[in-house]
Image (cartoon, grey):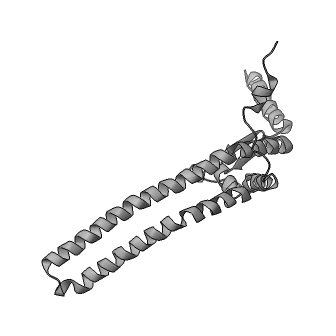
């Protein structure tokens, strides 16, 4: 009975040593969104988007300044204003706040739409770069790093910067078509 336990223990020990000596998994993490948005191509797209949105942003800032001025006026002149004047000024402030909130939400949606457009546009190029890097480096597992989910990742496993650099190296190249591999093969005869 004792020898049987010893044999089982030896088998588990050999199995454990065998797995460890055979090799370890090569694991990496990449923050896909960060890699894409830190690329020069995405930065150029965001610069164009910011230039297009600048007039709207300035209009919203002007509206915020109007609200601040009217609120300051209401506070400083409240003692010399009639109740009707206070009420009208407060209504004007409230209307401008509603307008500002609505337009800020619309502005934010537009920014989000532009960011999503860039992600969709550069997504296939990111995937191609990542696949090349996986092949070159021989990674067994690559995880999408999300700081809200992962508590800790050793920086030596983070390949986000490498992916961004490879995206920059391929700037100006056509975006790979993800369906090209299946279409090139054609129907089997």
Q: Of all residues shown, which one is farthest toward the left?
A: 83
- Image side of residue 80 versus residue 130, left or right: left
* Viewer-side residue, 116 vs 137: 116
Q: Residue at x 45, y 69 (%)?
A: 59
Tally the marks: 0
Residue 136 locus on image (x, y percent) = 86, 44
Q: Quadrant of the N terminus?
A: top right
* Viewer-side residue, 8 vs 50: 50
Residue 188 locus on image (x, y percent) = 80, 15
Residue 38 locus on image (x, y percent) = 69, 59
Q: Residue at x 32, y 67 (%)?
A: 96
Q: Is residue 158 above or below residue 71?
A: above
* Viewer-side residue, 187 vs 26: 187
Residue 184 locus on image (x, y percent) = 80, 27
Q: Residue at x 37, y 61 (%)?
A: 101
* Viewer-side residue, 5 vs 142: 142
Q: Is residue 86 above or below residue 29?
A: below
- Image side of residue 14 versus residue 45, left or right: right
Q: Quadrant of the C terminus?
A: top right
Q: Quadrant of residue 142?
A: top right
Q: Residue at x 20, y 83 (%)?
A: 78
Residue 23 in sight here? yes
Q: Quadrant of residue 125?
A: top right
Residue 148 in sight here? no
């Amino acid at each position: 009975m004792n020898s049987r336990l010893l044999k089982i223990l030896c088998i588990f020990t050999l199995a454990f040593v065998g797995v460890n000596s055979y090799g370890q998994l090569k694991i990496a993490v990449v923050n896909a969104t960060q890699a894409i948005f830190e690329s020069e191509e995405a930065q150029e797209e965001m610069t164009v988007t910011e230039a297009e949105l600048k007039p709207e942003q300035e209009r919203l800032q002007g509206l915020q300044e109007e609200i601040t001025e009217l609120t300051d006026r209401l506070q400083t002149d409240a003692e010399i204003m009639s109740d009707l004047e206070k009420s009208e000024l407060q209504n004007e402030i409230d209307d401008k706040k509603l307008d500002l909130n609505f337009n800020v939400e619309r502005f934010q949606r537009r920014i989000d739409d532009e960011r999503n457009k860039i992600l969709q546009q550069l997504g296939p190029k990111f995937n191609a770069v990542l696949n090349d890097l996986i092949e070159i480096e021989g990674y067994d597992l690559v995880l999408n790093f999300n700081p809200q989910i992962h508590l800790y990742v050793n920086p030596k496993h983070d390949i986000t910067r490498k992916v961004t650099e490879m995206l920059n190296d391929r700037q100006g190249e056509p975006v790979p078509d993800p369906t090209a591999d299946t279409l090139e093969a054609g129907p089997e005869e």
